[in-house]
Amino acid sequence: MIAIIDYGVGNLFSLCSSFAAIGAEAEIVRDADALRAADRIVLPGVGAFGDAADKLRASGLAAPLCEEARAGKPILGICLGMQLLFEKSYEYGVHDGLALLPGVIRPIAERIPAGYKIPHIGWNALTFTGAPSPLFSRIKDGDCVYFVHSYAAEDCGDCVIATAEYGAPLTAAAARENVFGCQFHPEKSGEVGLSILRAFCEIS
Amino acid sequence: MITKRIIPCLDVKNGRVVKGVNFEGLHDVSSPVELAEYYSRAGADELVFYDITASAEGRALFTDILTETARRVFIPLTVGGGINTVADFDRVLKCGADKVSVNSGAIRRPELVGEAARLYGDQCVVLSVDVKRVDGEFRVFARGGRDDTGMEAISWIRRCVDAGAGEVVVNSIDTDGVKGGFDLQMLDAVCRAVSVPVIASGGAGCTEDFITLFSSLPRVDAGLAASIFHFGEVKIRDLKEEMRRRGIPARI
């Protein structure tokens, strides 16, 4: 069973529907026992980092999520959920993340040339970096996915597995061992997105 | 590289697609769910559903349709029509919409844009505006293009973007239905005024109109159309291949 963490941030309808569409058993969970019982965990999220980090900690699920991640369970953070996996964010102040991935979250405005619109919104191509990731076992370099974000991960060392070109290469996906993050929305990225979710379900 | 988006728009009344649709291989040509799936397979980057229902029963049918579509179609879904309050946002977002487009509701009560943006984020709020030239200026029209509000369009759009609208759909009444191409002059004026994505609507008659749009106005992010897609006059797949051939980034 896949646990989709509900900590009061964002709408989980599409995410649940997309797992249903690939025949995966997913459940919305709000307590630590259900999280521990799951085979794999998805951390979704939209909105502002500080608020989401507070809500995740207040839900009591941050600590068990980190324990499960360290025990080797496959974890997938999506959009803001991905950002929460990193060490810190500089969105309206400085906020601590879960530090399951190395790196910090900064405004993309600091990196991209003038004239590029913010948020980075729309379909952009993935450029794979580093060693082939099991998350991309069913898609190919250059496939497009759907982004909506104004902040992105930086200083991630060798954990970046894909970038998207938007005046500068933005971190599109990152991974370290069993912990994965997608800045884009696989649940809104058509067949390519479903293939990424399918691949995540196959990671052992 | 970010791609230019191609967005078919479906008018839905009492749970059915209104404008005539003519496709082979579709069992039920007026089923919004089937049509949405068809477009998603054909390469649409996003879908817009406009609810043009007046009755409460029709509205309930619309949300059922929306839920079913969001269960089966995994591309961004924008919903418009009859959005007057934050409760209307809530109703359609719960059914799987990703973005909500406001038009007359924002004209009646401009605070709606800011209220919704604070609750759901700027990326969720799409300002849709029907614009027509009157006495040498761009004028905002309400109620599906029937009423002249007297407001100048560029300042209205700027005001809504400042309040939190994350995208703008510009529908030119002057070119709508004429099939002679998008309203480049109007779109250029909007692109110069705001820094959020601009979606062109009204006037597309053929593939070349999209090529002209994106080549002459690189700051336009997306092209929206209804009947030329519904009647198969322009096939999305062919359109995107032509865009790529002509150096315009497109998702295939």
Image (cartoon, grey):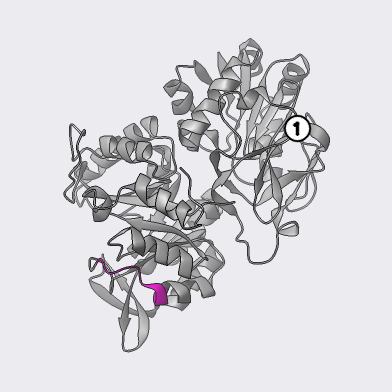
Amino acid carrying label 1: it is Gly
Chain identifier of the residue bearing label 1 in the image: A
Q: Answer whether residue A132 is magenta in the image.
A: no
- Farthest residue to the front: give it: B245
Q: Position of residue A102 (x, y in %)?
A: 82, 34
Q: Nearer the viewer, residue B56 or B35?
A: B35
Q: Answer whether residue B181 is magenta in the image.
A: yes
- Farthest residue to the bottom: give it: B135
Left or right, A204 with reference to B161? right
Q: Which residues are magenta?
A: B179-186
Q: Is residue A98 visible?
A: no
**Residue on which the image places disc 1:** A130
> Is residue B151 depicted above or below A85 in this figure?
below
> Is residue A61 depicted above or below B148 in this figure?
above
Q: How many marks?
A: 1
> Is residue B181 depicted above or below A2 in this figure?
below
Question: Residue A43 lies in what quarter of the image?
Answer: top right
Which residue is pictured at 58% across the width and 21% down the height? Answer: A199
Binning the other alpha carbons within 10 Å of mark 1 as few (below 14), some (14 to 19) or many (20 upward) gives few
Q: Position of residue A81 (x, y in %)?
A: 65, 35
Q: Position of residue A195 (x, y in %)?
A: 52, 26
SS state under label 1: loop
Question: Residue B118 lies in what quarter of the image?
Answer: bottom right
Left or right, B222 with reference to A28? left
> Is residue B153 depicted above or below A201 in this figure?
below
Which residue is pictured at 77% across the width and 50% down the height? Answer: A90
Q: Quadrant of the C terminus of chain A?
A: top right
Q: Quadrant of the N terminus of chain A?
A: top right
Left or right, B77 with reference to B133? right
Q: Nearer the viewer, residue B36 or B236?
A: B236
Q: Position of residue B219 (x, y in %)?
A: 52, 66
